Image: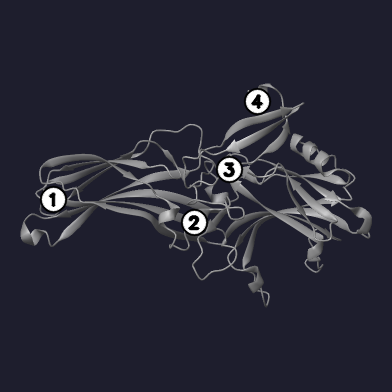
Amino acid sequence: MSNSVHKKNSRNGLICIYLGKRDFVDHVDHVDIVDGVIKVDTSELDGRKVFVQLACFFHYGKEDLDVISLSFRKDIWIQHIQIYPPPADDKPVITPMQDVLMKKAGEGSHPFTFNIPPNLPCSVSFLPAPWDKGKACGVDFKIKAYIANMADDPDEKIDKKETCQLIIRKIQFAPDMLLPGPEVNICKQFMFSGKMIHLEASLQKEVYYHGDPIRVRVKITNQTKKVVKKIKISIDQTVDVVLYSTDKYTKVVLCEEFRDQVNSQTTFEKDYIVTPLLANNKEKYGLALDSRLKDEDTNLASSTILQTGTYKDVQSILVSYKIKVNLMVVGAGVLGSLISSYVTAEIPLILMSPKPTVRLLRRTGDAVRLEYILPQRHINTPKFTDIKLWPTTNAECA
């Protein structure tokens, strides 16, 4: 269980970041605002200023390997705000969260607010190889407060003891309205035969949660003289890296074979249960995972949901899944069994985490303490527990 306030001090103690949470939800059309507070001790600034920046970046190598001007990090989006001295025309609107944080931080606290564009990627990391040490490659969001003369001057050297930073996450949850699952129909006619094999594959629902069993309904109508000897069900994870160029990577996260046989001129129907889990893919380095804070558990990366018509404008790492139902078909007789052909149906799959439920822990005056928890039945989903002190009304807690 996390503390009600996340804070990070600079090593010299002059600045400190305060955040009420570190997970910010992407609602497809907008993202939760990042509202926090910087506490500033002005006694040793010597005329310098205090800035805070929020950066979204893709890192693909260790920071200690950044030598001879080679960078292993690509900044996707970055924004700076001057905290102290506050700009003359700056009249910030204080959010309820910032009001609580400023009371917590005390004298010298200054609010800051960032609006994350919805076309940025969600936080994602890639499963490292056994020989890779340190932080895994992936997309991160970092809030950094620092003391400097200019907000972004590459020639100005900023002392590390005068900086502090916190990693935050941009995450998506499954939509509230779950639609019926997709259905795919495939008919394949074989050479020298006027008959065909008809394959129907469908899912019960559109979205599945991490760790939940997935029921795949398979119906086969075999009008040919051939025999379906084996049914294989696999799930592919595809990652589109839409940054400087478009790269695509596909990893098989589940593959199961079933020895059900469908003879000539028969119909077969059965439900198969499959469950893709990170625990069964620990050796597949390069697999996309949901980003994690510190050493908490995680799961396979959640599917990316984009707003309609925004694909061309997005700079992102897009994660998608599909289920493949593959039939191995052989001819009749001894010689026929030596030659096989295949019938394949592909079904799109959305794999995500459910929205956390909110539980009222206790009320103190005009403030309440809330707990956000994901259902524990999702064995491969990280605990999303964030306790916040938030002024609210009785109606909002109902």
Report, in whole angstroms, how far the alpha carbon at label 4 lies from the one at label 3.
Answer: 19 Å
Q: Say left or right for 295 vs 51.
A: left
Q: Amino acid at mark 4?
A: Cys
Secondary structure state at the residue bearing disc 4? helix
Residue 57's place in the image compared with 199, above or below, is below
Nearest the eye: 245 or 347: 347
In the rendered image, the quadrant that contains the C terminus is top right
Badges 2 and 4: C-beta atoms under 8 Å apart? no
Secondary element type, mark 1: strand
Q: CA gap, disc 3 to disc 1?
A: 49 Å
Name the residue that disc number 1 marks. Answer: 227
- Looking at marks 3 and 2 on the same chain, the residue that comes earlier in the sequence is marked by 2
In this rendering, is residue 235 above or below 185? Answer: below
Residue on which disc 2 sits = 288
Q: Nearer the viewer, mark 3 or mark 2?
A: 3
Crowding at mark 2 (Cα within 10 Å: few <14, some 14-19, many 20+): many
Q: Position of residue 300 (x, y in %)?
A: 47, 52
Mark 1 in CB contact with mark 4 (< 8 angstroms): no
Gap between marks 2 and 4 measured at Cα:
37 Å
Residue at image position (63%, 73%) is 65
Q: Earlier in the sequence, mark 4 or mark 3?
A: 3
Tag 2: amino acid: Ala
**Could you tell me if the residues under marks 3 and 1 are in contact, i.e. CB atoms within 8 Å?**
no
> What residue is rendered at 12% in x and 41% in y?
266
Task: Look at mark 3 in the image and give the residue it sits on.
Answer: 384
The answer to whether 199 appears left or right of 171 in the picture is left
From the top left corner, tell me how far across and down residue 81 is, in percent: 79, 51
Say what secondary structure mark 3 lies in.
Answer: loop
x then y, percent, for residue 176 = 51, 32
Instruction: Looking at the picture, tell me which residue is in the foreground, 218 or 163.
Output: 163
The mark found on residue 397 in the picture is: 4
